[in-house]
Amino acid sequence: MAVEVWNGEERRVVVSVGEVTGAVGDSVTVLPVVVAVAALTDLHLPVLLLGFAVFQFVWGFRYGVPVSVEPMKALAGLVIAGALSAPELMSAGLLAGGVLLALGSVGAVGRLADVVGEPVVRGVQLSVALVLARTGLGLGVAAPATATLAVGVAAVAVALGYRRASALAVLAVGVVLAGLDVGVPTAGLPALAPGVGFAFTTDGLAATAGQLAMTVGNAAVATSLLLSDLYDADVSPDELATSMGAMNLLAVPFGAMPMCHGSGGVAGKYAFGARSAGANLVLGVLYATAALFAADLVAAFPLAVLGVVLALVAVELGKAGLATERRWLAVGVGVLGLLTNVGVAFVVGVGVDRLRNKV
């Protein structure tokens, strides 16, 4: 059964079973990272969730197709690992938003994607995956019994054929354990305030460069192609960049997390059954509801379970990072990013890629 919510000139917004399951497909790329950031920093999970809720609604109705709203994973991964502070994260989100808005407004994203080679983008993804894996291992070792339980749940999910949802299943275990610790959570309205301030530093600038490489390649160019392939939607990379820029400039000052679109979230929604922006409507409602009850649970969330969640996210991100014909360059950028920082790895990777293309 499907309920039609809105019927525009070109696109319909429908709520059906497929849209509900499609919403789950997108959440597997969002919730583990967002909960990790909230658990390991002073950022407030209810505000983070509310930011995702608002822009699921906004972009769903704006584009009329299941556009994803995801964390900026390079920045999130570095703040989870302790390589960036929360104020640096917020500042980087503002800076990335300004750059994306400017690039998209003048139609430069497509041209920039030609300069930043695909193996370099994959290498940045791999670098973040390695940083997340290192952090996850450290958290899991601190409480091996709890981590073993989480790994067992993930193994069962994979064995049953739900590999993509394994991180979400482990996250659910963490929520249950936290609930047993604090009891039934009470509802509370999120306080819209950044709380952590802002700090523009060289580390933040370097991280922003790496994030922009991922955003241009994955959240703009690849997402535009995927929306065309799966939904026959004409949404240009520059249009997506403009919307991401506006989203961050509007949301980050209120304490929301730096956000972007992403091909992974679009693919997840489609694979789980979403065929209209109804999945955005469903997911927006779910995020907004969770924001009302999240504060108590995140404070008690077991860090060992969080470590396993991060490891599972790292595996998925790492597989994406290796999906290139020039794997040697992606691996080199990834390892260099782990040993130094993502910004240095990005600059070196672009230089090597450009030199190789001239030879």
Image: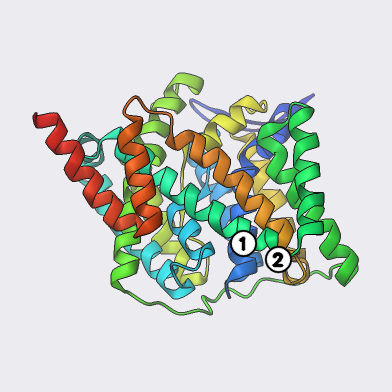
Which residue was labeled with disc 1?
Answer: 138
Cα gap from disc 1 to disc 2, whole angstroms: 7 Å
In the displayed structure, does residue 39 sit left or right of residue 235?
Answer: right
Q: Residue at x 45, y 80 (%)?
A: 197
Q: Position of residue 330 (x, y in %)?
A: 35, 38
Residue type, label 1:
Gly
Left or right: 343, with 234 as reference point: left
Tell me if I can see residue 349 in this picture: yes
Q: Position of residue 331 (x, y in %)?
A: 37, 39
Expressed as whole percent of the image width and height from the top left, the position of residue 38 reads: 62, 66
Question: Residue lying furthest left in this view?
Answer: 358
Query: Mark 1 Cα within 10 Å, few/some/many (few <14, many 20+)?
Result: some
Q: Are marks 1 and 2 in contact (CB under 8 Å)?
A: yes
Label 2 crowd bin: few (<14), some (14–19), many (20+), radius 10 Å: few
Indicate the quadrant containing the C terminus: top left, top right, bottom left or bottom right.
Answer: top left
The disc label shown at residue 142, or none: 2
What residue is shown at x 33% (from left), y 68% (from top)? 203
Foreground of the two, 126 or 207? 126
The structure residue drawn at horizontal position 37% and vertical position 65%, both measured from the top left corner, is 92
* Residue 322: percent from left, percent from top: 43, 33
Which quadrant of the figure has residue 279? Answer: top right
